[in-house]
Image (cartoon, rainbow, N blue to C red):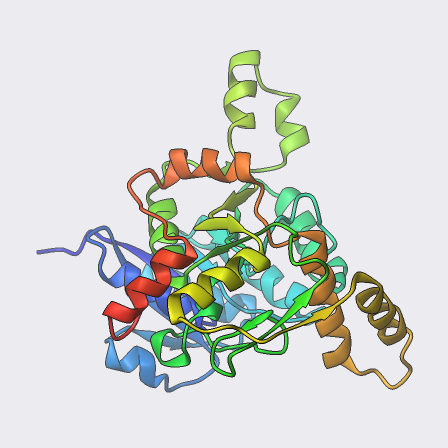
Amino acid sequence: MPDNRQVIAVAGVGDLGKYICEELLTSDEFTVIVLSRRSKHQWCEERQIPTYTTDYTTASVLAILNTTNATTLISFINLATTRYVEVHASLLTACQQSLTCKRLIPSEWIGDSETFPLKPDYYATTRVPFRQMLRAQNEVEWTLFNPGWLADYFLPREKTYIRPIPDKFPVDPIGWRCCIRGTGDEMQSWTCGREIGRAVVELCKAEKWVRGNVMSRLAKLSIGSHLDFLDQENVTYVAGEWATFNAAIKVMELHYGRLLPTTHKSVEEIQHSLTSHMNDQDGDYEALELAQVEEMMIMSHLACPKEKTMRHRQKYFAKMQFAGLEELLKHADGVGFV
């Protein structure tokens, strides 16, 4: 019998992309292929996921999309230089020229990018120019997909695909320590990788995403269509829970039955670090990146906008159940892998 499942192409799998691939594999409506610079990808081979080698030029990506009849391209290619724009421009052009692939999720996977479109700072020269390219065309449907923090950072390493970032994420469950930036009462949101994977699958099932240049199309639409078009979004949000890091510490301590040693870094210290490293002639990129992440914490940049997120949950993810931190920790205790 012919296989009528849609083919979803995933570029640059990484950690989070593994959850998307696994959830696509469990779906009756989709199958998945992976684009990679590597000719061998053991994780994909173990799961019999076809891998296609590419240099991410338009011609290379286009050949793969047309050969596989892919309908959606999802990127996890996270670059902090203008190379991001070059690669994603190639992905977009390949979709535009493709016979079948007319949907694209670029690599952002962050928080409230509408309130904070230029954060972290390197987004101004990477994500913003590509967003402008997306808005200037009307051949490919697209959406940014933002889940806030990855809740997996609260978990032991052996429980998740997501690698820990103990110097950047306030809670280090492996070293059992915590560094609160700011007051700790700044609102955040987080979603576990497995639920992000399931949400992406649900979004792929949706009949409509945003399409084309908003302003030029609004000028041509009738009042009725105008309202329908405004209901479509450039950014899709998911969140398992909204909470503060102070609240998360209490959940961790209660779950594990021991106090979590905690230090603090003030807003003034973060601002001083950010300013000094931005003017650092030696170019200590890691220190600058840390300062930018800390700034996002105290600005609540990783807190997805609740009203819009809940609207998206009702519209796209009504069949899903999302877990808060307490539920996630209990679930992790009961399974070998989340």
For the image, the number of numbered tags is 0
Residue 166 screen position, x and y as percent: 57, 78
Q: Is residue 112 visible?
A: yes
Residue 288 screen position, x and y as percent: 77, 74
**Which residue occupies 51% across, 32% down?**
232
**63 w.r.t. 311: above or below:** below
Q: Residue farthest to the left?
A: 1
Q: Which quadrant, please, contains the N terminus?
A: bottom left
Snapshot quadrant of residue 337: bottom left
**Which residue occupies 52% across, 48% down?**
242
Does residue 190 appear to the left or right of 23 in the view shown?
A: right
Q: Nearer the viewer, residue 326 or 250?
A: 250
Q: Which quadrant, please, contains the C terminus?
A: bottom left
Q: Nearer the viewer, residue 49 or 288?
A: 288
Q: Is residue 142 visible?
A: no
Does residue 242 appear to the left or right of 71 in the view shown?
A: right
Does residue 317 appear to the left or right of 148 in the view shown?
A: left
Residue 108 screen position, x and y as percent: 58, 58
**169 w.r.t. 244: above or below:** below
Does residue 17 appear to the left or right of 111 in the view shown?
A: left
Q: Residue farthest to the front?
A: 258
Snapshot quadrant of residue 119: bottom right
Q: Nearer the viewer, residue 307 or 70?
A: 307
Residue 283 screen position, x and y as percent: 83, 82
**174 w.r.t. 16: above or below:** below
Q: Residue farthest to the top?
A: 223
